[in-house]
Amino acid sequence: MKLFAAFLVLSMTAGCAAEKNPPVAQTDVAQPSTSSSPTVAPTRNEKVTAIPDPVPVCDGSGRGITTISWVGDRDSIYEIRLGGPQGKLFAAGRGPGTAKTDKWVTNGMEFTLVMKGGATALDSIKVATTSEGCE
């Protein structure tokens, strides 16, 4: 009887010890969420800027020089168009990129960023000219 009681006690304590340190289950690994909250779509980060803006015009010609820069996906090809998405092509390349104008930029000139072959403006900027700071 003592042998049976010892066996019974050992069996019960062995089961308790096993439950205190269970093996790591596969469910402890991160699983995809099953919540009903909506998925947030990624936003586009394309942007076009001009430096300097306003563009200095110090000779009275009304024309100046600026550098147009754009930010975008390195795997996409962008175009900078004058006056809108269908305008004259000024520059093209992968993002990010830059292109310096010659002395033809006028007050209110618009530079528009589009995907290559696209007709939709991703971003645009209208530059101003100034004689401020001229000597």
Image (cartoon, rainbow, N blue to C red):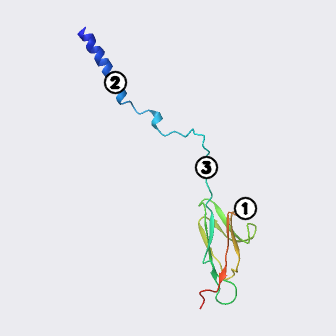
Q: Secondary structure at mark 3?
A: loop
Q: Quadrant of the C terminus?
A: bottom right
Of 6 and 71, nearer the camera is 6
Instruction: Give the distance between the C-alpha atoms of the residues marked 3 and 2, in whole angstroms.
Output: 46 Å
Q: Secondary structure at mark 1?
A: loop
Which residue type carries mark 1? Thr
Image side of residue 108 versus residue 73, left or right: right
The quarter of the picture where residue 9 lies is: top left
Classify 50 as above or below 36: below
Q: Residues within 10 Å of mark 3 (few under 14, many from 20)?
A: few
Q: Position of residue 112 (x, y in %)?
A: 69, 68
Marks 3 and 1: in contact by CB < 8 Å? no
> Residue at 61% of width from left, 46% of height from top?
39
Q: Quick one: label 1 or label 3, which is nearer the N terminus?
A: 3
Q: Secondary structure at mark 2?
A: helix
Image side of residue 3 versus residue 15, left or right: left
Residue lying at the far right of the rendered structure: 86
Which residue type carries mark 3? Val
Q: Nearer the viewer, mark 1 or mark 3?
A: 3
Instruction: Give the distance between the C-alpha atoms of the residues marked 1 and 2, in whole angstroms.
Output: 67 Å
The quarter of the picture where residue 12 lies is: top left
Q: Residues within 10 Å of mark 2 (few under 14, many from 20)?
A: few
Of 103 and 30, nearer the camera is 30
Q: Nearer the viewer, mark 1 or mark 2?
A: 2
Of 29 and 131, nearer the camera is 131
Residue lying at the far bottom of the rendered structure: 135
Residue matched to label 3? 40
Give the number of the disc on residue 16. Answer: 2
Which residue type carries mark 2? Cys
Image side of residue 65 versus residue 20, left or right: right
Residue matched to label 1? 120
